[in-house]
């Protein structure tokens, strides 16, 4: 069998490949995420948080370092790009930069009365950032800083939150 006959199938596919490709690159969607998109995101994050809460609390005896497990994924308005912030704020009710995305059923945050869409303005008397400017860059730094305050708290010690809920300031104490 000659080299040409062995390469014929490859050469035919290579020659036909440009015809199978689109003439121009497919455009990237610039659409602003909808409330349905954010609801799906919240449901997925809640499922993950529920699994993580169950695993970490059930296996605490196997761990050499512990962190408070409060069953409350948080997020920051600045995590979302400037073009998505208005829709994110409307869906998640952000009244400050840090918000409660979801609450694990039966977890400490749930028992304390925390609700999805609560906006966190203080954690253990440490103020959290207010609403960002419309052109603030996309970053998870504010969320990470708030998360660090929570995870560095002594295990078993009540965690004090001050939240905004529908414009009202509420103190909430979560006992992990």
Image: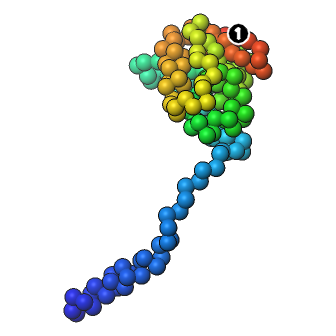
Q: Is residue 8 above or below residue 158?
A: below
Where is 125 relative to 115, above or below? Answer: above
* On screen, residue 85 above or below 71: below
At label 1, counting other C-alpha atoms closer than 10 Å, the crowd grade (few under 14, some 14-19, many 20 or more) is few
Say if residue 105 shows up in the picture. Answer: no
- The kind of secondary structure element at disc 1 is strand
Q: Position of residue 84 (x, y in %)?
A: 63, 39
From the viewer's perspective, tell me whether residue 7 is left or right of residue 142: left
**Residue found at x 69% / y 32%:** 89
**Res. 80 visible in picture:** yes
Q: Give the residue at mark 1.
A: 171
Colouring method of the image? rainbow
Give the camera-side residue of 51 and 24. Answer: 24
Q: Is residue 113 left or right of residue 4?
A: right
Q: Is the N terminus in the top left, top right, bottom left or bottom right quadrant?
A: bottom left
Residue sitting at x 61%, y 30%: 134
Q: Could you tell me residue 131's position as x and y percent?
A: 63, 22
The residue shown at (60%, 20%) is 70
């Amino acid at each position: 069998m000659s080299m040409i006959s062995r390469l014929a199938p490859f050469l035919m596919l290579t020659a036909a490949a440009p015809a199978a490709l689109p003439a121009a690159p497919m455009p990237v969607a610039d659409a602003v995420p909808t409330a349905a998109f954010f609801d799906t995101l919240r449901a997925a994050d809640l499922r993950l948080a529920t699994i993580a809460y169950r695993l970490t609390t059930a296996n605490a005896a196997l761990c050499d370092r512990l962190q408070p497990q409060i069953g409350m994924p948080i997020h920051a308005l600045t995590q979302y790009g400037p073009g998505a912030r208005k829709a994110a704020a409307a869906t998640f009710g952000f009244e400050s930069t840090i918000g409660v995305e979801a609450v694990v059923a039966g977890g400490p945050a749930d028992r304390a009365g925390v609700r999805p869409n609560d906006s966190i303005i203080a954690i253990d008397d440490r103020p959290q950032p207010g609403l960002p400017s419309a052109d603030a860059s996309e970053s998870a730094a504010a969320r990470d800083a708030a998360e660090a305050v929570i995870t560095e708290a002594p295990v078993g010690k009540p965690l004090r939150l001050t939240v905004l809920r529908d414009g009202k300031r509420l103190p909430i104490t979560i006992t992990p």
